[in-house]
Image (cartoon, grey):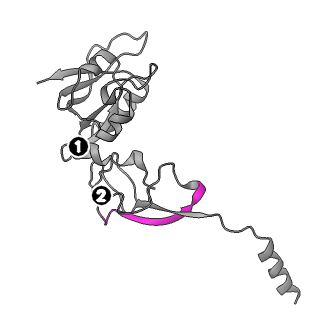
Amino acid sequence: MFGLATAQTVHLLRPPPPPTVDVAVTARAVAAGTELTRDDVVVRAIAADLAPPGALHTVRDLLGRAAVVGLPAGAPLHATLVSDDGVSAAAPRGTVVVPVRLSDDAIAALLRPGDRVDLLAGTTSGSEPAAEPQYLARSALVLPVPAEREAEGAGGLLAPASDGDRPVTLVAVSPDDAPELSAVSGWGSVTAVLVP
């Protein structure tokens, strides 16, 4: 009786399990640029406080979208890890889409969807220019902004949304170029050279 009472007390004092939410995760490792299919995605219940912001909750939300970066099996999927439907439609097959903030706003304003550019690492403030230019991506394709997103911003893809923001240019590049380009764009300086 004492053991039964102890077990009942422990059961009553144990906190309830945390709330869960269904989140789409990768069923297997997926390479960058891979168009997701039903074999690549499963839905699993995870603790609600561990779900990433913008988490996607159904397999249907992901079908036909491409992984922006390489993903391990079991990775929770959210909006920044997969291409947007409108953007991926304009990107050539086998490429991934990377948002880039160019160091020269005037050059960014001149670019139009369909332009091809070489992207190079620029110098940070006070740094000496490199003896040899560091190419981050060659012949990257400038992509259009989806129509619904263009309407939200002040000037769409190629114009700053506010005075303090640099414009973002979406480019399609090879999956091999994407990690370094994304990293340099996030902390350093990227310049563009138009190519025929």
Tell me the residue that label 1 is attached to.
95
Residue at image position (41%, 26%) is: 161
> Which residue is nearer to you in this view: 196 or 6?
196
Report crowding for label 2: few under 14, some 14 to 19, many 20 or more residues within 10 A (C-alpha): some
Residue 15 in view, yes or no: yes
Q: Is residue 83 above or below residue 29?
A: above
Identity of the residue furthest to the right in this view: 2
- Quarter-of-image position of residue 119: top left
Residue 180 in view, yes or no: no
* Secondary structure of the residue carrying numbered label 2: loop
User: Residue 193 placed where, x, y %?
Assistant: 21, 20
Residue at image position (47%, 66%) is: 44
Quadrant (top left/top right/bottom left/bottom right) for the N terminus: bottom right
Tell me the residue that label 2 is attached to.
36
Q: Is residue 12 above or below residue 35?
A: below
Residue at image position (27%, 42%) is: 87
Q: Which residues are magenta?
A: 38-49
- Quarter-of-image position of residue 16: bottom right
Q: Say if the magenta span includes residue 56.
A: no
> Which residue is nearer to you in this view: 128 or 9?
9
Q: Earlier in the sequence, mark 1 or mark 2?
A: 2
User: Residue 43 placed where, x, y %?
Assistant: 44, 65
Amino acid, disc 1: Thr
Say how many tags the image has: 2
Is 174 displayed left or right of 82 in the figure?
left
* Secondary structure of the residue carrying numbered label 1: loop
> Which residue is nearer to you in this view: 30 or 165?
165
User: Residue 68 placed where, x, y %?
Assistant: 33, 45
